[in-house]
Image (spheres, grey):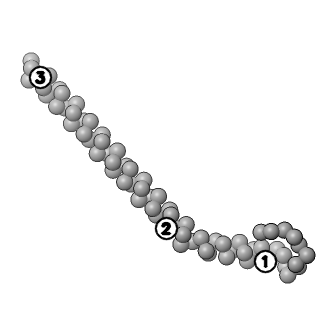
Amino acid sequence: MVDYFRILINARLAEMEERGASAVEYGLLIAGIAALIVVAVFALGPVVKEAFADTCASIRGGNSNIAATC
């Protein structure tokens, strides 16, 4: 009977260790995705900024009397 309880306890402890490992793996996966997003934002930031500046200049159409800021 004692062996049975020992087996049950060992099984529960093994399950807990697996849960911790998968939580760490998910955390690393999320950190990797966040790092990719940061790199993409820094890489594409100037391109997007230039696109908005071109759009703003097109809207103004060379008319400097427009006081709106883009």
Residue 4 is tagged as 3
Disc with the residue nearer the chain's start (1 vs 3): 3
Left or right of 43? Residue 35 is left
Residue shown at 85% from the left, 79% from the top? 61
Residue at image position (19%, 32%) is 11
Among all residues in the image, which is located at the extreme right? 65
Q: Secondary structure at mark 1?
A: helix
Q: At numbered mark 2, what does the secondary structure look like: helix, strand or loop?
A: helix
Disc 1 residue type (three-letter) = Ala
Report the residue marked by disc 2: 39
Which one is earlier in the sequence, the residue at label 3 or at label 2?
3
Residue 16: give x, y in percent of width and height: 26, 36
Tell me where residue 7 appears, x and y as whole percent. Answer: 13, 28
Measuring 91% from the left and 76% from the top, which residue is drawn there?
A: 65
Residue 18 picture quarter: top left
Q: Which residue is mark 1?
A: 57
CA distance for labels 3 and 2: 53 Å
Residue 56's quadrant in the figure?
bottom right
Farthest residue to the top: give it: 1
Screen quadrant of the N terminus: top left
| Residue 31 coordinates in the image, percent (x, y) | 42, 56
